[in-house]
Amino acid sequence: MQKMSTSTIHVYRVIVSSLVFLLSCTVATSDRKPPLISRLVKDTATSLYTTTGADKAPLVVDLAGSLVWSTCPSTHGTVMCESATCATAKEQSPPRCRYVDGGRFWENRKPWSPWCACTAHPLNPVTGECSTGDVTSLAMEISNTTEQPPEESLAIVGACAPGHLLRSLPARATGVAGFSRGPLSLPSQLAAQRGFGNRFALCLPIFATFGDTPVYLSIPPDPRPGTIDFTTSGVAHTPLLTSPANAGGYYIPVKAISVSWHGADATAQLPAGALDLDVRTGRGGVVLSTVTPHATMRPDVFRAFARAFDDAITRGKIPMTTVERVPATKPFELCYRGGFPRVKVPWSWDVPRIVLELGDGATRNWTVDNNNYVVEVDGALCVGILPVDGGPGGPAMVIGGKQLENNLLVFDLEKQRLRFTGLLDRALTSCNRATFYRN
């Protein structure tokens, strides 16, 4: 076994101390750094969203993910198993997952790595598989709003993972960036490093921001003071709920689901509390997801929703037109063909609105408009919401990527509150018109 020199031991201790400091330090207000911006990309093959890791390699954005993980270079540093960083990493272990062959994850450790090196359990959120890998330092490339140069490379505490854990992720992806409340998620680590408050925003599929930065979506883009900041001006908000079974997940208090079209309103007939989150067991509830391409509903919830949607279609169709339900085109269950006119704002089909009725102090309901759920398949219009049995402890509904797109979402983790704009098309703007300005 190769012995460590005194200088090597010193370097290693500095690395470990830096990682611990990253998680535990509190930055003074006067030392706060400018907010950060990460450009996102939607992978057309998987409908997943990626941010940029080391060497421009994509990392999949997972709202519920507790870790940042990646395949590691041929050699990598490690963290002592008795360190505070390791204790935090061990708390992030996924409660339920299918372990794949973890590989001999110690083979690529640097020669001076200790026998007692910390390991974590990276999770593939698409397949539900997990593995074992070293806790290490990963590089993230990200932009800031005011400083030069605009691109920064930041060290993030993450986990190594074997290549076969990348199954079902985008072709070039090297891992996952977790965006949960957990202390080792990407937003939490950036907030600890930069001291700009535990707040981040998503505007899929275009960008994510970290810190308290205004977002201007004017036409044409105009970041001058006095223009509308879409993170605060007239934006609705709802409490964020936490599930004991999915601590990283962001849940919202949906109490009912209704469908509206041309004055015909229909409410999904569900038992009282059918959508509620059981705070003791974690069963049920409505959760947001960036790794679920289309919304899903528990089968009993979907059946009630489908009846309400059919009812609104039947009673709300334009006179002298025909709208008929047609055989389903997998994976979709609700498909229609007939007299759906076009509308200009937003430019899409005139179809029913789906309303998620919020409670617990929310200031407005969550409306799912045409572009957030309609999928065109072989001349038919299908509803991009699927029945999925998540098991006895699964959620009542998952709001997927299709439903989150072009909707500015601001996650304020200090207040446990979510701000949301609704479909930006209706405000004659979109995520790709964003500009950023900081006084």
Image: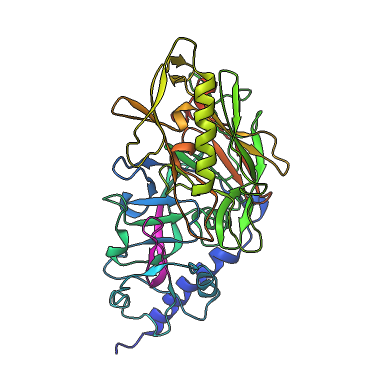
Residue at position x 32%, y 41% in the image: 330
Whether residue 131 sits left or right of residue 95 in the image: it is left
Task: Please tell me which residue lies in front, 135 or 162.
Answer: 162
Residue 435 in view here: no
Q: What stretch is highlighted in magenta?
A: 121-140
Residue lying at the far right of the rendered structure: 361
Residue 425's x, y, as percent?
A: 49, 24
Residue lying at the far top of the rendered structure: 320
Location of the N terminus (image quadrant): bottom left
Residue 83's x, y, as percent?
A: 52, 77
Instruction: Judge whether 261 appears above or below 22 on screen.
Output: above
Task: Please tell me which residue lies in front, 336 or 30.
Answer: 336
Q: Does the magenta stretch include residue 283?
A: no
Residue at position x 32%, y 63% in the image: 165
Q: Is residue 123 magenta?
A: yes
Residue 36's x, y, as percent?
A: 50, 44
Quarter of image, res 111: bottom left
